Amino acid sequence: MRHLLSTRDLGRDEAVAILDVAEDMADVADREIKKLPALRGKTVVNLFFEDSTRTRISFEAAAKRLSADVINFSAKGSSVSKGESLKDTAQTLAAMGADAVVVRHQASGAPSVLAQSGWIDAGIVNAGDGTHEHPTQALLDAFTIRRRLHGASARGRDLDGVTVTIVGDILHSRVARSNVWLLSALGAHVSFVAPATLVPIGIRGWPVTVGYDLDAAIAAKPDVVMMLRIQGERMNAAFFPTAREYARQWGLDDERLAKLPASSLVMHPGPMNRGLEISAKAADSAQSTVLEQVANGVSVRMAVLYLLLSGNAGEK
Amino acid sequence: MTARLVLQSADITRALTRISHEILESNRGASDLVLLGIPTRGIVLARRIGEILDSIEPGSGTVGFLDVTMYRDDLAKNPTRAPSPTQIPAGGIDGKTVVLVDDVLYSGRTIRAALDALNDIGRPRAVRLAALVDRGHRELPIRADFVGKNLPTSSSERINVRLLEVDGVDEITIEGGDA
């Protein structure tokens, strides 16, 4: 693997292989010494043009557990605020000898520009670009689902026949986009539930069914309900009348939680708006995988960094 | 290129039985013994030795496996290797005598990686090494404590260890060289 830009590039076998490596990485987290020497001497740069806590810390923890050196770069307080271009920033990082660059950018497609431009020779990992994709989030979601469903025998298995309902702001959600491609490549059936204003145009080509009624979706007893964050920073038009109305129509409240089968998983990529798209009771219930998702995120990102940085990619 | 058969199924079983007795003898019994196989075929061999130990002294064959992929010194030189799972028996390895089990002992680099991996898991009382075949050409100061068969080879030859559980047949062959 040279870069990880989109889950659309991943086939079933490749995705299962990444998840299997992540299983091995997860075993390391249970040990007293949570460190592997595999990426000693490699440098990973976290290049974050957009705010993030869990993704950046997760990548940092993953790189450090593999003994790589980590350089954190955030646009605030850097030369980017003086107007430095992406090209110059990338070339600066290349000159410092970065082996992998983890990019989060507010513009969709920025990571693939970096990967294809030739400005920098490092492996590029997309850590969220605009409203396009967030592949490691989808991988950790798939990993979490697979672990909950299959437990210790999860290795080598896909998500054949699993029903996943993704609820909320699909329009702005890179998590939803990455999940659609990955989960359907793994054999799961994905459906969206959202207000019509938050369903993207051009969704017909996606391997997904669209509904507008959360109660009907819950009555269909999905194996997984994934609530998306209402992204206040991107709500620049009147997508729904008020937050309270959104919560009543499309929020996972206590009443809907009670109707959901006890075996269904409740997922959220975080950060959560408690009381808006998810109630506190749903977020803290035994069905909720929110904290597992965070823990699994480190394992999955270790697997991605390992697959990207180990091995002689040039000769393969 | 022809492959020369050097060990057959019965030879392998005999070698493993002898190794098992030697392990018990050098350990003065079966107490605090942990066998750790190195993937892929070392795991099979460790299980077989564990069964033989169990039949000699019941309850003595504690078997696990140890993946050394992440500790290899050639990660950057070869195409990406997928790691395989590590499973340490419930009692851990602290204060135990660990016997590493591998199929072929060659450069010794895999064993060096295994020693580093053990270091991150615990502190055994002693570490021993059992190999089904020792083919020479060591590149590190490492030797086996228990050897099934010494096979002096040229480095252009290839040793194939095939085991029933993985390959459907029990045999060891030598391929290639200047024959």
Image (tube, coloured by chain):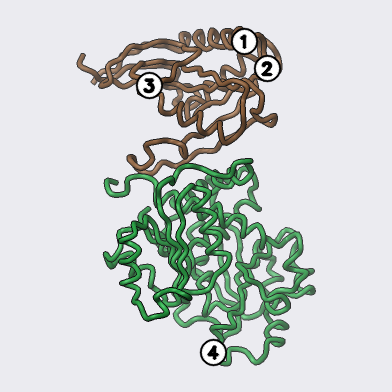
Q: Which mark is residue B60?
A: 2
**Mark 4 lies on residue:** A236
Q: CA distance from mark 1 to mark 4?
A: 74 Å
Disc with the residue nearer the chain's start (3 vs 1): 1
Q: Which chain is green?
A: A
Whether tag 1 and tag 2 are in contact, CB under 8 A, the answer is yes
Q: CA distance from mark 1 to mark 2?
A: 9 Å
**Mark 1 lies on residue:** B24
**Mark 3 lies on residue:** B106
Q: Front-most of A19 and B90?
A: B90
Q: Chain B's shade in the image?
A: brown
- Amino acid at the residue labelled 3: Tyr
Residue depth check, mark 4 versus mark 3: number of the one nearer the observer: 3
- Amino acid at the residue labelled 2: Ser
**Share a chain, discs 1 and 4?**
no
Quadrant position of the C terminus of chain B in the picture? top left
In the structure shown, which secondary structural element does the residue marked by tag 2 occupy?
loop
**Share a chain, discs 1 and 2?**
yes
